[in-house]
Amino acid sequence: MNESSPRTITQSMQFKNGCATGMSHRWKNGQYCSIMTATGIVGCGIYDLATAGEFGQAIAIARGTPQDPLVDPDDLLEASIIAATPQALALGIKPGISGRAAVELMLAADSATV
């Protein structure tokens, strides 16, 4: 792959409460990553919570730094959630929990609605 070519990676991720899809998107001078469940997304700070909340979406975000960016879905697992939409908060997701815990809460909600 050429350094300037954009790249997307999708991977299946297994958790205690089920399976989710991890995604990483990279391009020249940028990247973002997320973990998607049927209920919502745990992602990096690129997501706009106001818009997601307006559309009724459960989104929880963690934020990396230029020195320690969130590049791959696995980077989200130990990262701390810094904010969430009202829909994610209703699932028990709150600032300070790990990305892994947020995914598990979303997966538990997925199985409760099946």
Image (cartoon, rainbow, N blue to C red):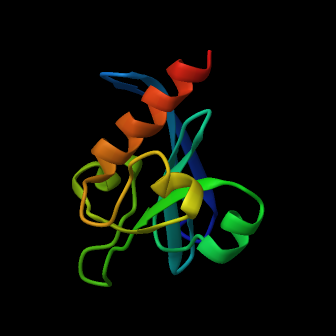
Q: Residue furthest front?
A: 90
Q: Where is residue 55 shown, x and y percent of the image?
A: 77, 60
**Visible in this render: residue 80?**
yes
Q: Quadrant of residue 27?
A: bottom right
- Residue found at x 39% / y 38%: 105
Q: Where is residue 36 shown, x and y percent of the image?
A: 55, 42
Q: Where is residue 29 shown, x and y percent of the image?
A: 51, 81
Q: Residue furthest bottom?
A: 66
Q: How many marks?
A: 0
- Residue found at x 53% / y 76%: 30
Q: Where is residue 33 shown, x and y percent of the image?
A: 49, 57
Q: Residue furthest top?
A: 114
* On screen, residue 104 above or below 52: above
The residue nearer to you, when weighing 15 against 39, is 39
The residue nearer to you, when weighing 107 against 67, is 107
**Visible in this render: residue 24?**
no
- Residue found at x 26% / y 60%: 79
Drawn side of residue 102 relative to residue 42, left or right: left
Q: Quadrant of the C terminus?
A: top right
Drawn side of residue 104 relative to residue 1, left or right: left
